[in-house]
Image (cartoon, helix red, strand yellow):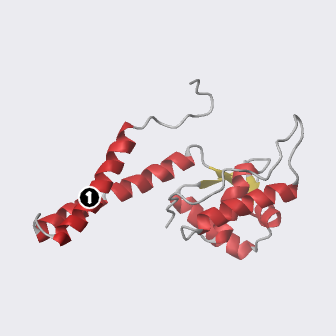
Amino acid sequence: MLKFMAHDVSSESSLKQPSEGDAPSHDELLDWVERVAMFLANDGVPPIAGRVLGWLMVCEPAEQSAGQISEAIGASRASLTTNMRVLMTVGFIERRTRPGERTGYYRLRDGAWETVVRRQIASLVSFREVAADGLTLLGTESTRADRVREAQNVFDWMAEVFEQAPPPERKGDKR
């Protein structure tokens, strides 16, 4: 469901650089959250799920109750619950409770982006097996086989690139 393929996203930002101690306004945060939601919507992610994810990336405190999230992004609790379940299933967010409280709090999982992207890459790369079976079915010398081989070559290339890629920098890494 979540595919995060490259989209045409402007590299120029309309946001000003904050001064030290200058926090963005709620409206500025929501504008950015909406950009996240629209980016993810290109891959079929429901807008509410994209807004939840965007909000949990920038909210303070980092853990928020469903009520806080609902109020912050202007979503109904019913649609929020459904979309948060999707984000938990995919591995982006997690729910925690606090001792003595019945309220659940949601947060972005540590390493969530890497986990989700690696799972998607593995899924894409696994198409090599499907392509290999197609070549076995068609034989190797035909225009039909050429089209299948082209797909197999792309997925072989992807596998090689990602096997050789260094891991992403983590908080506290010194590079």
Nearest the viewer among 56 and 64 is 56
The residue positioned 32% from the left and 49% from the top of the image is 157
Q: Is residue 71 left or right of residue 77?
A: right
Residue 135 image-quadrant placement: bottom left
- Disc 1 crowd, CA 10 A, few/some/many (<14, 14-19, 20+): many
The residue positioned 48% from the left and 52% from the top of the image is 117
Question: How many badges with numbers are in the image?
Answer: 1
Image coordinates for residue 156, horizontal then vertical, percent: 29, 51
The residue positioned 56% from the left and 60% from the top of the image is 7
Image coordinates for residue 86, horizontal then vertical, percent: 57, 66
Which residue type carries mark 1? Gln
Quadrant showing the C terminus:
top right
Q: Circle 1 is placed at which residue position?
A: 152
Q: Is residue 22 left or right of residue 168?
A: right
Image: 154 above or below 141: above
Nearest the viewer among 57 and 42 is 42
Image: 22 above or below 83: above
Image: 46 above or below 157: below
Image coordinates for residue 12, horizontal then vertical, percent: 71, 50
* Residue 3 shows in this picture: yes
Nearest the viewer among 112 and 94 is 112
